[in-house]
Image: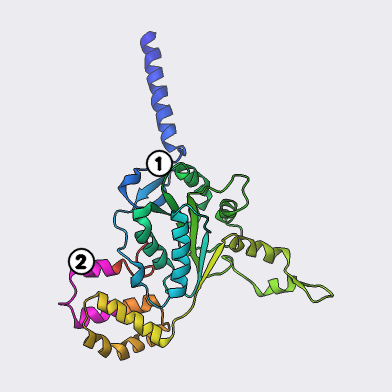
Amino acid sequence: MNQNFEHLLLRAEQLITRIESVLPQPLSAPDWAAAIAWRYRKRSSGHGTLEPVRHVGSMALHDLKEIDAQKEKIQRNTAQFVAGRSANNVLLTGARGTGKSSLIKACLNAFAPQGLRLIEVDKADLVDLPDIVDVVAGRPEKFIVFCDDLSFDDGEPGYKALKSILDGSVAAATPNVLVYATSNRRHLLPEYMSENLSYQHTPDGEVHPGEGVEEKISLSERFGLWVSFYPFSQEEYLAIVAQWLSALGVDAAAIAAARPEALVWALERGSRSGRVAYQFARDYAGRTEPAHASPAQIADVAGLSDETSTL
């Protein structure tokens, strides 16, 4: 009888172990010395983990051209944050391919020696943001929670989670965590023509938005610093093309000769963005100057383009 009882206990322990393996587990701290950037990943089992990014794009602030005003704001805010002074959560919005994500990555590389770290979180996983903040709250490093290409549809759960973390939770803000988000939408939610009908006009001429509009504006207003990016002019676009070609080892004469082709390339794509400039530079350098760029150079430059790699 004792043997049967022991066998039953063994089976019960095995069953409990299997059940525990599929239950959500508390987020555990990674090896913080393994990297300067991490991605938050959620498995099908519901387990969330912080995975180190082994190869962060080798991007420097001086590599980013024609966005000097935006660069100054982000660099100043990040410097304040790393130095332990007051700083703001940041929302970078505007034209696609103009360097929003690249600027954040460049700041990471610039301030990593001073203790800056980055955690990339997809918008679908923002509901777990409080758990991520709890894991890093006691660390000496400064953490940027990076949400790339952020936008929400009506009713998405991550929307309210982000609002609470930014400003609105009963808990005080964690001094070593800021949220940097990029978006093509200034208010992060779709806006409809019908919402204009909800605006109210007072007798003295004041205009007040309706509740639906107020709700949409409330999230973006919780970011203390807004940085807007705009489409590039023709000359700005060509300057960026020259920057990428130079980084790929193309000589000055060939860069000057490439200007007409670069303009045609942009016309065909319907955009004069930094991303389009980078794509042209890779094509042109590959066709005309293959001997000038080593595989290592090409790999480094690939890390410089906006949104061509996650980090």
Q: In this view, does 217 lie above or below 281?
A: above
Secondary structure beneath label 1? loop
Quick check: is 182 in the magenta stretch? no
Label drawn at residue 296: 2
Mark 1 nearby-residue class (10 Å; few <14, some 14–19, many ≥20): few
Mark 2 nearby-residue class (10 Å; few <14, some 14–19, many ≥20): few
Residue topped by disc 1 = 29
Name the residue at 22% across, 88% down.
253
Task: Tell me residue 121's x, y (percent).
Answer: 45, 54
- In the orientation shown, which residue stands out farthest toward the right? 203
Name the residue at 41% across, 87% down.
234
Name the residue type under label 2.
Ala
Q: What stretch is highlighted in magenta?
A: 281-301
Name the residue at 60% across, 53% down.
167
- In the orientation shown, which residue stands out farthest toward the left? 291
The image quadrant where one finds the N terminus is top left
Task: Tell me residue 67's x, y (percent).
Answer: 43, 75
Q: Is 186 left, or right, of 206 in this rendering?
A: left
Quick check: is 293 in the magenta stretch? yes
Q: In this view, does 84 lie above or below 63?
A: above
CA separation in Å, label 2 and label 1? 33 Å
The front one of 72 and 229 is 72
The image quadrant where one finds the C terminus is bottom left
Quarter residue 28 falls in: top left
Q: Is 305 left, or right, of 146 in this rendering?
A: left
Is residue 147 in view from this perspective?
no
The front one of 28 and 230 is 230
Q: Which colour scheme is used?
A: rainbow
Tell which circle, 2 or 1, labels the residue nearer the N-terminal end.
1
Task: Tell me residue 42's x, y (percent).
Answer: 43, 48
